[in-house]
Image: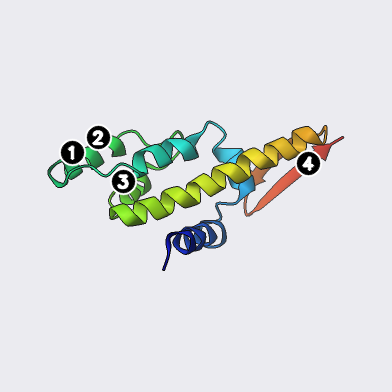
Amino acid sequence: MDGITLIIDERVKQTQKLGRTVIHDVTNNSEYQLIDAVSALIIDPPLELRDTFIESQSSYPPVGWDREKWKKLLEHPYTKRLQIAGALIAAEIDRVNFKLTLADDGQSSGISQGGSSTEISVRL
């Protein structure tokens, strides 16, 4: 498979299987956590430094992210990390565009997640 197909497949997995939708990202990743994750995932340290890199990076997951899940992402092979990073870039674009769309429409929003549902309220 080519790169764009791999990234699309990863983004579909993130949204449909893991529930990482634009609403989730607006609610939980508004401090640029997605970009923080990308900046670590795209590094391909030399083999002799890989374990040290994973240990040092896993100590500092993006704000609000689970440390063990973050470490598992870092342990993927380089091409898989690039695939995940590409999907996270798409997620960040969606998050920013969602917020810009609301701002362009002159609306403010309140987004809250509770239980198994997400509620969005938009005021004109």
Q: Give the residue at x 51% y 60%.
A: 8
Residue type marked 2: Ser
Do the residues bearing badges 1 and 2 touch, measured as CB atoms within 8 Å?
yes
Residue 91's spot in the image, x, y percent? 55, 47
Q: Quadrant of the C terminus?
A: top right
Q: Give the residue at x 42% y 41%.
A: 38
* Residue marked by disc 1: 52
Nearest to the observer: residue 91 or residue 115: 91
Question: Along the polypeptide, which appears first: circle 2 or circle 3?
Answer: 2
* Residue marked by disc 3: 71
Going by the image, does 106 lie left or right of 68? right
* Cα distance in 3D space between marks 1 and 3: 12 Å
* Cα distance in 3D space between marks 3 and 4: 35 Å
* Residue marked by disc 4: 121
Going by the image, does 75 lie left or right of 112? left
Going by the image, does 80 lie left or right of 10? left
Q: Quadrant of the N terminus?
A: bottom left
Nearest to the observer: residue 115 or residue 110: 110
Please tell me how crowded label 1 is: few (under 14), some (14-19), or many (20+) other residues with Cα within 10 Å: few
Secondary structure under the numbered disc 2 in the rendered image: helix
Residue type marked 3: Lys
Q: Residue furthest left?
A: 48
